[in-house]
Amino acid sequence: MERAEAEAIYDSGRERCVEVILELAGAVERLEERIRRLEEQLRKDSRNSSAPPSEDPPKTRAERRAEARRKAKLWARDQGQRKQGGQPGHEGSGRKLRPEDQLDEVVDHYPQACRGCGRAFTDDERRPRRRFGRHQVAELPELAIIYSEHRSHRLSCPACGARTTALLPDAIGSSSFGPNLQAAIVTLTARNRISRRDMSELALDLFGLGVATGAVDAICQRAALALEGPHAALCASVLGAPALGVDETGWFTAAAARTLWTAVTERAAIFRVAEDRHRDRLEELIGKDFGGILGSDRWWAY
């Protein structure tokens, strides 16, 4: 802010000055909270978080020697006296509190009476203070299935007397389950590898909805047919990329050993479960002409 702009705000009156001060104070609080979160991220390494050691920042020789001396002193001091669990001064690893702008609800709780003399607090005294305890709870909203009935009415034509019955829209289809519910079932069975039988039980436990194992399988089959076109387009996009990465790893399907093959680009990836890791499976994934691109600039293996 330039001096001339600040003087103009001052000349505009007391209310405008107060508004600007409050805006600046709010901006400062948001920036301080952001700085605090960034500093917490910088302090994280493989010892106090789930980050792998390869992501730790490099240390100088002096820092490594100082850390080794500190560990030696702690070991000598605590030998035979160190208790199990977190030590004094150790920063806890509990859940971090979410910032206030990411909360959906804030509930204030006030004491009913003074713990010293027992005097009850009045409603006017139960007001927010600058310092307060914070305890956050994550909860799912109540899940309930919405049942809709679509009625096909029949009308008689006053001109010719023919009777015509309404047709259901194509978006409804013949299934008894809506698209969102079917998408949830497909995601849990395909992405999370939940069996048809377990999915039937899970739908009853989570949604209170009875779905037979045959209905779960029919939903998955319809989803597979609907995704044939997008899947083919995705495969063509990946295999036609100027650079392609290929990898394979162990996999299990119905307790049988399998191999999971993948071909990836910078923007997409395709996966295929095969019986083994032989050359024929690689041909099935990227085509029989892959031999012509081995050693070229458009193929590499992890």
Image (cartoon, rainbow, N blue to C red):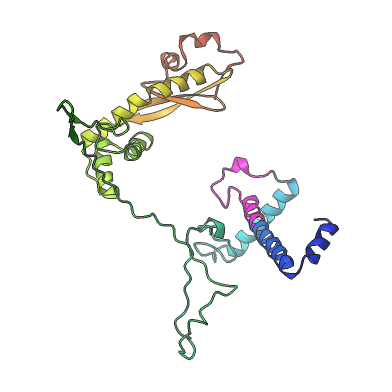
State whether residue 99 appears in this view: no
- Up-down: is 145 above or below 299? below
Residue found at x 18% / y 34%: 154
Q: Is residue 102 above or below residue 119?
A: above
Q: Quadrant of residue 198?
A: top left
Please state the horizontal and vertical placement of residue 21, each as a whole percent of the image. 72, 65
20 lies left or right of 221: right
Residue 118, image quadrant: bottom left
Quadrant into which the C terminus falls: top right
Name the residue located 49 percent from the left edge and 64 percent from the top edge: 106
Q: Position of residue 41 (x, y in %)?
A: 62, 51
Q: Residue at x 26, y 32 (%)?
A: 168
Can see residue 127?
Answer: yes
Where residue 112 appears, as percent x and y from the top left, is 44, 82
Q: Which residues are magenta?
A: 34-58
Q: Is residue 55 magenta?
A: yes
Q: Position of residue 76 (x, y in %)?
A: 62, 61
